[in-house]
Image (cartoon, rainbow, N blue to C red):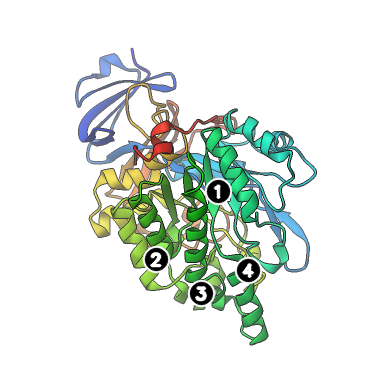
Amino acid sequence: MFELVIRGDRVVTPAGVAACDLAIQGEKIVAVGAAGSFGADTTKRLIDATGKIVMPGGIDPHVHLKWYSPHPDGSVTYTDPPSVVGRAALYGGTTTMIDFVRWTHGKTIQQAIDDRHKDWTGQCQCDYSFHVMVEGALPPEIFGQLAEVLRAGYPTVKMFTTDITPSRRGRMVDFGDIWEVFKVVADAHGLCVIHGEDNDIVMHMYDKVIRENRAGFENMAEVHNAMSEDLSFRRVLGLAKNVPGIALYFMHVSAAFGVEAIREARGRGLPVYGETLHQYLMYTSEDYKRPNGQIYHTYPSIKAQSDQNALWAATLDNTLHTIATDEVCCSLKDKIQGKRVDDTTGGNVGVEPRVSLMYSEMVGRRGYSLERFVDLVSSNAAKIMGLYPRKGALAVGSDADIVVLDPSRRFVLTKEMLHESDYSPWEGHEMLAWPTTTVLRGKVVVDGGKYLGDLTDGQFLPRKISEEIRSGAML
């Protein structure tokens, strides 16, 4: 007898949308049959999701939880921890998040990994994994350490091509060291994750707007501008052409220039993948002018309507593959404390509404297929990040991470409906669906608005990048 069967007439599987029964035993999907294949006599519980959408759990490949957050007065706090955001993620239908191990000078990479596990182990309600982030001038011994952890389940390495703000000097990795990291990552069959902005242009623009007494945060798009993304992406891609076996993932693509650089590289056969954020798809630089306009900001800046249009087009032509949040969960007070281009808090609060927000905009308003929507919020992240088909698929042998999305639930979102922070940049949006049930590895963790999970439910996920992704053959 199965422990759980979920029946639906719109089940999004790797083979397409079908009327199916999903049979679950333990943590796995153990059988998939036509709807009605498994009756009540074959299972302890039958969830009838007829009229709803059954999909793999959402995967957010870009979050920052319990994250170092500097303040304009020089003090430092940490953003909300996994115990807050993990619960909210499950309410919203996201079952896996990928955060970062931040390596800093004076530690080994393994020490940084061990410290980061202390922030998460037994303290997250959904599954998780880590990118390794290196910064600044890289000492010679770091490359051997990277090679070891890449092969030990941490196969993605993030680097910055800018310091982001003048107060964060030392964040950027110079191109000589990026070249060396590329060679290590290629040899270890990993993936490089890039925050791409041109540091010279960004710092020049900080100096310029401050000198011209235009330092208000509403001018952020001038500083973190589209040209900066163009220059940086193309320089990184030019370097990658000279490193056989390297694969790249550009995080938070925000501009039409970045889209075009990725499109051209993929046209040449390079294994390059792009991520955008729901902020960039839903807001433009004009929104900085709204009251508390800081709530829409993350780094790089939100940009012009023409850039947003290019991002939407790129989600359809397979130039952009994932939609993430760059989650930085903090209070409204902390989010709006900075008033200038050089002290505005980055990141955003969005893990919980992401899946439903993107369904509403993609499927509900723009006519995307269910398959394309699921690719962008779940399956592609699993494939690129080395989790597929364990995650991101409703298939025999996959983890039973399942979301039942109800398209009859239509309402205007308010912050009081959500389970993280005291503000939401998504307040006021008309939602065209919301999850009724979330299943994590076979356990029903949210059902009918009731939270049934536990703080220790989440598991760390070691990863390995597939050769299909590294060669560009899968996507």
In contact (CB < 8 Å): disc 1 and disc 4: no
Image quadrant in which you'd find residue 26: top left
Q: How far across and down, in percent of the image, does residue 161 sit?
A: 60, 58
Q: Nearer the viewer, residue 374 or 91?
A: 374
Work out which quarter of the rendered image holds the N terminus and state it: top left
Q: Please, is residue 395 above or below residue 413 in the view?
A: above
> Which badge, 1 or 4, comes first in the chain's sequence?
1
How far apart marks 2 and 1 lie (CA) works out to 23 Å
Residue at 45% across, 56% down: 277
Q: Please, is residue 189 above or below residue 205 in the view?
A: above
Secondary structure under tag 4 reads loop
Q: Looking at numbered disc 4 in the image, what kind of residue is underneath it?
A: Thr
Secondary structure under tag 2 reads helix
Which residue is the site of mark 1? 63
In contact (CB < 8 Å): disc 4 and disc 3: no
Q: How far across and down, in percent of the image, does residue 250 sit?
A: 48, 52
Which residue is the site of mark 2? 256
Residue at 33% across, 38% down: 55
> Which badge, 2 or 3, comes first in the chain's sequence?
2
Secondary structure under tag 3 reads helix
Image quadrant in which you'd find residue 43: top left
Which residue is the site of mark 4? 344
Q: How far across and down, in percent of the image, does residue 42 sit?
A: 28, 14
Secondary structure under tag 1 reads loop
Which residue is the site of mark 3? 288
How far apart marks 1 and 4 lie (CA) works out to 18 Å
